[in-house]
């Protein structure tokens, strides 16, 4: 925890004894509500004064001025108390903004700064900023916390409660009474008009019990089942209609009791919505799994086709090489045979010359016959060689033609495989495109389910926290309105802000009390934490509507102007009205909620200086 502590110059045990004695003195002094003397270092910043006790039931607002090093406490009637402070020194500056008290502890010790005592600690951020007793040298000297005189810190501790608003600002701002037609009234309390308990609808008892709503409804005099029944009955009535009296219709006025019943019904409706969204989400999940399976199968088919293609191309290349070999063998044989035919023709011509020569010679018959036989044998051998050559040529031609056929077949296989790959690529693309659409549908279903779950949680919180003051926050930056009660978000909705590019300022409106016994009209106080000087004219944008608006001079960001610039739906207005009660706040700011806003905090706003 970053909480700093006053570095009292004494051991912890002695400091406890000293503080206990100081407590006794303060108790007597505070009872008379007079000026409380403080040590000299505290008096440098002015007197510590408990002017009066806060009005019963009136919400308190604590305002801290870092520039003046002063703290003031206000209720519905005005100033209650004031005291000097010591805030964070350079390097450990105290954050400014709108906070609430998150934790209170009479006896607390810093876990960062040497276990230093931090009496009457009241935490305003979980990151470690708190109000507590400590030394006041008359200037900023802490590690970020807001030090108070001990006696005053004890009195302040007794005045406040968890949720008390704390405004830390450079300059002192005082909440002033404020009236404006755009501020909200409250619904009248009404009387319970609840039928006898009925059998709860399916799932209602479980959701109510799980949310711990039985105790909440019982405190309001309404059982969950009866509240839901009443809500359904109220919802069935036309707006502004009521029971028959004679021939006339008595106007039906909406009350807090009715709103409570509607909140119970909203829990059951949101639980049913979750079931519906879960079914849609499950169907979308199954669809995405099915399409994913088809996509994976299509990718595997494409992968197999692509893996087969190189083998087919290698077969085609091999067929080309075989053609080249067959063609080369055939050409070589033809060339060789051409030479051999020339030699055969030469031998045949030689044999013919020898035959003619033998015919005119006087050789013996036996010799001539022998020579003739030899020529006949040589002729027969040449004829046999010609026949064998013709067979060889025919065989080589066949091999060449077979190689051509093999190449054509291989090339057709490659071409067909290219077509298969192209078709499978197209299929993969189609399924992948289908998957994109399915994923969008799944994301839509997931978002709808998450929204339904968030709505259900808000509905549960809205009933659990219904009796508590509400904090309504409007951010110009986000264009959203958020409501928190009891540190839980109970409602959220978009809003429209006129002059959206012009600052609106940071303003805090606090409902201090009911103005009359009807408990509908509220008295309000307002604080503006930012400058109200008007903005300079802006250069017009090119697009028409923005240009026309930018050409107009935005009004000064005052409290009244801020209320007038916010436009919201009738449903949102009604949700705000049904939650308004003393202690509720309406905060408007240029900024979004601070990162300090979270679990177990109200809405924290930290406007820029």
Image (spheres, helix red, strand yellow):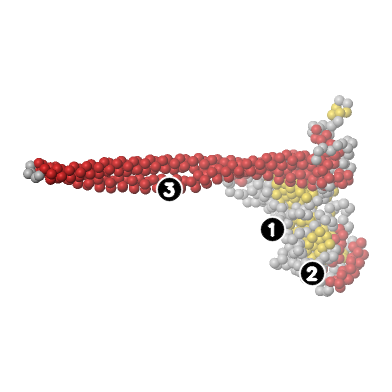
Q: Earlier in the sequence, mark 3 or mark 1?
A: 3
Could you tell me if residue 158 is visible in this image? yes
Q: Nearer the viewer, residue 209 or 69?
A: 209
Which mark identifies residue 609? 1
10 Å neighbourhood of mark 3: few (<14), some, or many (≥20)?
few
- Front tag of 1 and 2: 2
Q: Nearer the viewer, residue 283 or 160?
A: 283
Residue 124 versus residue 5 in the image, above or below: above
Residue 93 point in image, percent of width and height: 72, 64
Place residue 272 in its image quadrant: top right
Is residue 493 found left or right of 28 in the rendered image? left
Say which element carries label 3: helix
Residue 531 point in image, percent of width and height: 70, 54
Q: Spatial distance from mark 1 to mark 2, Cα to Cα?
A: 33 Å
- Front tag of 3 and 2: 3
- Residue annotated with mark 3: 314
Could you tell me if residue 526 is visible in this image? no
Q: Earlier in the sequence, mark 3 or mark 2?
A: 2
Question: What residue appears at the point 82 percent right and 43 percent down from the top-left corner?
Answer: 206
Residue 385 point in image, percent of width and height: 25, 44
Q: Spatial distance from mark 3 to mark 1, Cα to Cα?
A: 75 Å
- Residue annotated with mark 2: 115
Quarter of the image that includes the C terminus: bottom right
Question: What residue appears at the point 31 percent right and 47 percent down from the top-left corner?
Answer: 329
Q: Nearer the viewer, residue 156 or 552?
A: 156
Question: What residue appears at the point 51 percent right and 43 percent down from the top-left corner?
Answer: 425
Q: Spatial distance from mark 3 to mark 2, Cα to Cα?
A: 81 Å
Say which element carries label 2: loop
């Amino acid at each position: 925890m970053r909480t700093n502590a006053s570095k009292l110059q004494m051991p912890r045990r002695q400091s406890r004894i000293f503080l206990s004695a100081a407590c006794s003195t303060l108790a007597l002094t505070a009872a008379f509500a007079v000026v409380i003397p403080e040590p000299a270092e505290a008096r440098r910043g002015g007197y510590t004064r408990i002017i009066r006790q806060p009005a019963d039931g009136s919400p308190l607002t604590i305002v801290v001025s870092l520039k003046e090093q002063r703290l003031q406490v206000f209720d519905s009637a005005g100033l209650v108390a004031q005291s000097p402070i010591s805030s964070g020194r350079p390097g450990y500056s105290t954050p400014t903004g709108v906070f609430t008290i998150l934790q209170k502890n009479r006896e607390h010790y810093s876990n960062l700064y040497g276990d230093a005592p931090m009496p009457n600690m009241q935490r305003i951020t979980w990151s470690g900023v708190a109000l507590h007793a400590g030394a006041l040298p008359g200037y900023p000297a802490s590690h970020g916390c807001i030090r108070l005189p001990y006696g005053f810190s004890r009195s302040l501790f007794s005045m406040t409660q968890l949720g008390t608003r704390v405004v830390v600002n450079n300059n002192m701002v005082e909440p002033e009474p404020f009236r404006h037609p755009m501020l909200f009234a409250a619904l009248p309390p009404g009387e319970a008009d609840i039928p006898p308990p009925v059998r709860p609808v399916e799932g209602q008892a479980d959701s109510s019990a799980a949310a711990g709503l039985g105790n909440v409804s019982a405190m309001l005099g309404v059982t969950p089942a009866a509240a839901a029944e009443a809500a359904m009955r109220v919802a069935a009535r036309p707006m502004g209609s009521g029971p028959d009296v004679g021939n006339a219709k008595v106007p039906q006025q909406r009350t807090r009791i009715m709103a409570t019943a509607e909140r119970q019904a909203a829990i059951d409706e949101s639980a049913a919505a979750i079931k519906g969204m879960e079914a849609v989400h499950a169907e979308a999940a199954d669809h995405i799994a099915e399409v994913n399976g088809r996509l994976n199968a299509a990718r595997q088919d494409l992968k197999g086709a692509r893996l087969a293609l190189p083998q087919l191309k290698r077969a085609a290349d091999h067929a080309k090489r075989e053609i080249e070999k067959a063609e080369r063998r055939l050409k070589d044989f033809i060339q060789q045979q051409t030479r051999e035919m020339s030699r055969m023709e030469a031998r045949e011509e030689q044999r013919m010359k020898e035959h003619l020569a033998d015919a005119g010679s006087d050789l013996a018959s036996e010799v001539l016959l022998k020579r003739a036989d030899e020529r006949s044998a040589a002729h027969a051998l040449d004829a046999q060689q010609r026949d064998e050559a013709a067979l060889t040529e025919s065989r080589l031609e066949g091999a060449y033609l077979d190689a051509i056929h093999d190449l054509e077949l291989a090339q057709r296989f490659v071409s067909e495989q290219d077509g298969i790959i192209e078709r499978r690529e197209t299929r993969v693309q189609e399924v992948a495109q289908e998957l994109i659409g399915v994923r969008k549908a799944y994301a839509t279903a997931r978002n709808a389910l998450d929204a339904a779950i968030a709505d259900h949680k808000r509905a549960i919180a809205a009933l659990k926290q219904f009796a508590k003051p509400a904090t309504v926050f409007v951010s110009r930056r986000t264009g959203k309105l958020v409501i928190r009660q009891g540190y839980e978000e109970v409602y959220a909705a978009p809003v429209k802000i006129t002059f959206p590019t012009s600052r609106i300022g940071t303003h805090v409106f606090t409902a201090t009390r009911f103005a009359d016994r009807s408990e509908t009209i509220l008295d309000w106080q307002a604080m503006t934490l930012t400058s109200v000087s008007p903005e300079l004219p802006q250069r017009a944008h090119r697009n028409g509507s923005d240009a026309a608006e930018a050409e107009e001079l935005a009004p000064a960001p005052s409290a009244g102007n801020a209320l007038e610039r916010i436009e919201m739906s009738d449903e949102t207005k009604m949700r705000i009205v049904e939650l308004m009660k003393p202690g509720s706040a309406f905060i408007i700011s240029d900024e979004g909620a601070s990162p300090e806003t979270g679990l177990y905090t109200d809405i924290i706003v930290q406007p820029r200086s």
